Each structure stands twice: as C-alpha cells, then as structure tokens.
Image (cartoon, rainbow, N blue to C red):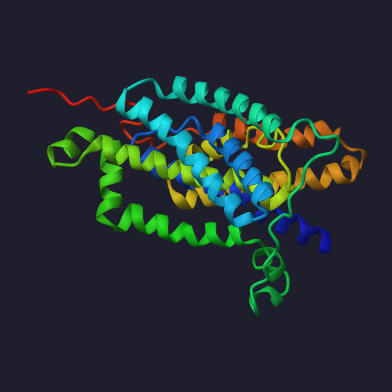
Amino acid sequence: MNVLIGILARAVTMSTPLLFGSLSEVVAERSGMMVTAIEGIFLIGAWGGFVGAYLWNSAFLGMLLAMACGLAIAAIYALVTVVMKQHQVVTGTALNIFVAGFCTYFQRVLFGVPTSPLRVPVLPRLPVPLLSRIPVVGDIFFNQNILTYVVYLLIPLIYLFLFRTAPGLTVRSTGENPVASDVAGISVNKVRFMTVLFSGVMGGIAGAFYSLGFLGMFTAGIIGGRGWIAFAICFLGNWHPLGAVVGTLFFGLAESLAIYMQSIGGAGILPNEFFIALPYILTIVLTVARRRFKVPAKLGVPYIKENG
C-alpha cells in the first residue's frame, strides 16, 4: 500500500511541470499560436532557476530568473512569428537549438567544468494542515511543494478566464476567426503576442521545477523532451484545461511508474531503457490513436491584415 501511495504521490509531483506547460499551451493555441519553442523555454527555465538559486542562494530569486528567461525566449518567438509572420514550427525549432547551446555554453562560463555536480536545495514539501492527515488522499495530494499547489489553483482560473470572461472570448476568437476579431476592433497580433508571453512565463516555471523542485541541479539533458510532451498533451486534451489536467496526470503516472521500476531494476521483467522511454512511447501511441480533434480554426496561421 505504501508503495502504491508513493507512486501516486510522485505522479502528482511529476505532472506539475507538464501541467504548467500544457495549460499555457492551451491558452496560446486558443489564440492561434503554436508555441513550438516550448522545449527551449523549459530548458532555459531550468537553467535560469538553477543559476539564480545557486548564485543568490534563493529559490525565490531563482524562480524569478527562470520566469524572466522563459519570457525572453517567448518574446523572441513572438517577435519572429507574430510580428514578422515567420513559420512557427521552423522558428520554434531554431530557438530550441539555440537555447540548448546557450545554456551549455553559459553554464561552463559561469561554473567551469566541476568535478562533481553543483547542487541547490530542492523546494521542500509543504503539508497542508489537516488535509495532509487524510488517509491516502492526504499523502498523495496535500504533501507536495509550493509549485504543485500553485498550478492546481491556476486550473480553475484559466478555465474561467477562457470560457467565462470577455478577454477569454477574445483569445478564442483570434484563434477561430481573426478577421472577425479585427473587424470588431481587436488587435489580433497583440492578443497573440500576449498569450505567447504568458506561455513563456509558465514554461519558465515548468522548467525551474526540474532544477529546483525535483533534482536540485542542472544538466543539459534535464528536460529530455518533456516540453514536447506538454505540447502533445494540449493536443490530446483537445485544447481544454480539463483535458490538459487528465493528460498530465496520466503522463505523470507513467513517469512515476518508470522511476519506480528503474529503482528496482525493472524487477527483471523489462530493461530499464523501456521504462525510461515509456512516457514518450505513450505520447506517440495516444497521438496516433486519437481520431477527432477540435483544432482552433487558424492554429499556426499568421494573421496578415488586408489593406482596403
């Protein structure tokens, strides 16, 4: 029983950064923007979080730097894709490659090549009074770190924003019918630019989770494609916050199970490499198996205002 509770609690933990990323992707893609730089935003968030926490001895300042780094990459992405109307996938791919080189280079500039990994304290677990004492449920949901609590508070806020407010309707309209939005006096490019910036801040927090909330260190491969998993969860959840929640918990469970099976050597059933690849295998299988998507009509299509 304790093993099962541990796996489920870790599943909630591992779903946290994916939820930050997928929720932000839902908002951005509802406006018509595929933030394909999400992997790079995750990575630079992890790097910024570690650097800030290590140099300034403060997880809070590390988190602020992670958000700033994610915001900077998102701003570049928005400038190229929204303002300059360049291809979103190509731009995102280029930024992902750039960030990988940037983080590796400046990690060595700042810290050289240490003989042992540099570490920072991980974010502590914060048991919720009373709720954490509930049998089973308390250990799983109410004995997590601050970022997990924050992201679950954001779920209803983002849902209400998208589907119960006028600004949320504006975001959705720019992804479905930007011409009509423009005629109504809405600045389509401004709305899209802002949703990409929001995605950058959220992605920076998601990346910082891995360096500050889980590992307490930074490596070039710390993200390992998880930004793309968050990107895929947005698709699999049909561009809906609640769908993103279900998807992230599912993938969090897969990653938690993979970590547990690696810790016991796969129990002699399958090689460890299979369990390492399990979340990515599930991403491919579920994406291929999905038959119906409610894709925003103008997703990935730059809006070019016609003269006259």
* Drawn side of residue 273 relative to residue 151, left or right: right
> In the drawing, does residue 126 fall left or right of residue 167?
right
Q: Residue furthest left?
A: 308
Query: As rendered, which of 183 and 94 lies closer to the eye?
Result: 94
| Quadrant where the N terminus is found in the figure | bottom right
Considering only vertical position in the picture, is 6 above or below 265? below
Whole-percent x, y for residue 302 in the image? 30, 26
Q: Is residue 184 above or below residue 228?
A: below
Q: Position of residue 96 (x, y in %)?
A: 55, 26
Q: Residue 117 at what x, y percent from top left?
A: 80, 39
Q: Position of residue 269 (x, y in %)?
A: 89, 37
Q: Residue at x 51, y 21 (%)?
A: 94
Q: Which residue ends up furthest to the bottom in the rendered image?
A: 130
Write the residue at 74% across / 47% down: 215
Of the pair 126 and 291, the residue shown nearer to us: 126
The answer to whether 35 is drawn above or below residue 11 in the figure is above
Res 75 quadrant in image: top left
Image point 77% across, 46% down: which residue? Answer: 119
Kindly identify the residue that appears in the image at 52 percent across and 40 percent down. Answer: 69
Q: In this view of the protein, can residue 1 be seen by the observer?
A: no
In the image shown, does 166 or 104 lie closer to the viewer? 104
Q: Residue furthest right?
A: 268
Q: Is residue 205 visible?
A: yes
For the C terminus, give its image quadrant. Answer: top left
- Location of residue 143 by image quarter: bottom right
Query: How many numbered marks, from 0 up?
Result: 0
Using the image as rendered, state which of residue 16 and residue 59 is in the foreground: 59
